[in-house]
Amino acid sequence: MSTISKILGKSCPTTGTLVYTVPTGKQAQGEISIANISAIDRKFKLALLSSGATTPTNADYIFFDTPISFGGAITRLFSMGAGESVWINVTDASTLAFVVHGLEVTP
């Protein structure tokens, strides 16, 4: 079992984007970091999708139109199983940076 943490995905999206999907036969845990690299406040959406899903349902959101101030950052821990995905969207511009960082392990 590997214990090396790494970048699992990253994006500065302009539309709804799958930024990371746990590979088949793996589990993942780590953190999702969102940084506002804009000169103004922005809003974002973040959802954790069930295996095989490509767009969120209302029950998938862990953040919805959440404000993040200029220069601000938010971090959220996660633990997901094979096929589950992190989906992100910036409501008004592509000036938020999302990074998924953590471990993938074989159960």
Image: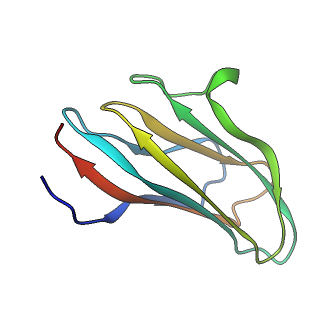
Depth check: give the residue in front, 19 or 50.
50
Quadrant of the frame with the C terminus: top left
How are the residues colored? rainbow
Q: Total label count?
A: 0
Left or right of 74: which side holds 86? left
Q: Residue furthest right?
A: 40
**Rendered view: 87 above or below 6:** above
Q: Residue furthest left?
A: 1
Q: Residue at x 51, y 30 (%)?
A: 49
**Rendered view: 78 above or below 75:** above
**Rendered view: 73 above or below 89:** below
Residue 27, picture quadrant: top left
User: Residue 5, percent across and down?
Assistant: 30, 65
User: Residue 30, percent across and down?
Assistant: 42, 55
Q: Residue at x 61, y 55 (%)?
A: 13
Q: Residue at x 40, y 32 (%)?
A: 84
User: Residue 56, percent across and down?
Assistant: 61, 27
Q: Residue at x 15, y 58 (%)?
A: 2
